[in-house]
Image (cartoon, grey):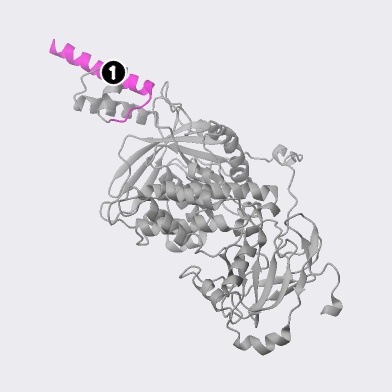
Amino acid sequence: MLDTYRDGDALGMVCGHGLDGLDWDTRHGGDVTRDGMLSAGVWPTTYGTAATPSGGGHDLVAALGVRSRDGISNGLDVKAGVDGAGCGFLFIAPTRKKSKVDGEIRAYQWTTRPDLDRLAEDGPTDDSGAHIAEMVGTARVGDAAPEDESPGEHDVEYADLTENQRARVDSYIESTRERIGKELRELQDWTPGQRDAKGNGWQKITADAAWRLGQLAREHWNTLTEAEARKVLVEKAPRDPGFDLPKIGKIWEAQWRRRPLEGLPPDLRERTTTEDEPAAGVDTTMSTDTAVTEPVSPWGKVDLAEVLADDYEPPRATILRRSDDIGLIYPGKAHSFIGESEVGKSWIALQAVAEQIALGERVLYLDYETDAAEITGRLRAMGVPKGDLLRYLDYRQPEMPPTANDTATLTGYALAVIDGVTACLSTFGFKGDSNDDVAIWTERLLKPVARNSAAVVSTDHVTKAKDTRGNYAIGAQSKRALADVCYLVSSDDPPFARGRTSVLRLEISKDRPGYVRGASPAGRAGERQIAARVVLDSDADTHQVTVKVEAPTLQQQIDAEQQMANELDRLGCPVFGRDKTIAWMKDNGMPTRSAAFMTRVVGIRNAKAQTTVLDDE
């Protein structure tokens, strides 16, 4: 092999076959760790040492009898293996690569050439690595080492990431800190003895948060410091007389180094340079680089031939069909369903999901608010067969933004649901009240999915102030501006639950294609157009759910006004002016409607009262 070696080639060593490696990195204190263990007499006998291009070192030691594990101490990774599993990898001299200290290309160099004869003689009985092996075994109880470690997988440095990757890493770290902080804050409201779905109490969850934060702080691919990670735990963790600040500090010290490093998450690995990667331009099968696709310019000329063809038909709403067979959702368009919490937005989206699955269409469901059991449980209650869910439903719970490759794979769906816009934005590191953030989010997620012909449905919340919420979701106004279709979801009934029936109103706030507006009643003066009346019914005994999407009629609105007037009379509402009636309803916990609607309700009551007076005379 050495006879065929040429400058620019890469040589590597797979560990776990009689010879292992200790990879110490001076940039992260590896030299201090090594010196301390040498002074304590627990550093293994070395059979060769190499200097790395970045100033660190690789010490070759007799097989340790353990699997590879990175980050067992500051700047110290163990490259080992057992029975061909969990094997680590080291590049060896004379491989050349770029230094992460000054960017210069340098070669790995033997400072002590390998003594394989001494290894063959002493290696089988060499137990000088026992302390290191013990450190590997106790890095985190119950955590198995990876079955396989690719070259340099754990050594990616933040400085070597592309600008796009750094932005996404920063976003990922910030959203992860916020998510863990939120989880810890929620523990403060737990009752004594309360446990999560896995049976964990709040102290165990706090300890787990410590090692999750600690692992991130120790990883090389981000800039999170130990102090920043610790601050999240100290500020957000719950406390009681037996779990005070000193106790939290002890939890941190015990946990933050215990989880092995895992390297750059797969979803963030677009193109990286790693500690043990050959110099740029080297053709080697050991490289972990992935292919980079040349992006299509957003300024590219659009071919107008298709939309100008004589037989071109603009997309009609064909999904979520009403009782009159008119659809409410357009293929290839972005739809926003806006309403208060628990009003029933997700149930409407799930009706569209069930409808498409029944037609044999694939559906993408990005869930940021509940979990798989909740969503599939609802669909099963709606009568969707289990086999169809497994065949046609692509359910995901993303915790970070999609990569370009991820987005490219989101094809072949008739419908895509984004359940929880606010939480989705946070995974991008974006704020819901920023028009710029919402615009970027729309370009990165909504439009790519919609361009693949999928109808995109997102659910979002309205502001708490009913009098000023208007036609908008909570946060940035660009949410509405960038959507093709917006529906406001409301109800006068209590939240839908098992054994209950709830009636929802689906009002048109925006319909850019215009077909749903054209197929819906004009509505009463001052009222938004109603696109549908949705009836959710749960059987009291079987809990089976029926969803009916009824076509609206003007008579339904007239009946609703009469019904509210009758209800106010029944409850003995003592006032008749519109504003006073609305104030009385709010004081008594009754849902109100638009000013125009309430004006007509008051008119009905006044007319009735006047008729009663005339009859008495």
Q: Camera-side residue: 247 or 206?
A: 247
The kind of secondary structure the magenta stretch mainly shows is helix
Residue pictured at 28% horizontal, 51% vertical: 191
Residue 64: % across, % down: 59, 79
Q: Is residue 612 magenta?
A: yes
The number of discs equals: 1
Residue pictured at 61% horizontal, 59% vertical: 266
Query: Relative to residue 160, is residue 153 depicted above or below?
Result: below
Q: Quick check: 161 left or right of 562?
A: right
Q: Is residue 376 magenta?
A: no
Q: Callout 1 environment at 10 Å: few (<14), some (14 to 19), or many (20+)?
A: few
Residue 307 shows in the view? yes
Q: Which residue is mark 1?
A: 580
Q: Which range is magenta?
A: 590-617
Residue 21: % across, % down: 65, 74
Name the residue furthest bottom: 121
Residue type of the residue flagged with mark 1: Lys
Residue 384 shows in the view? no
Residue 455: % across, % down: 56, 45
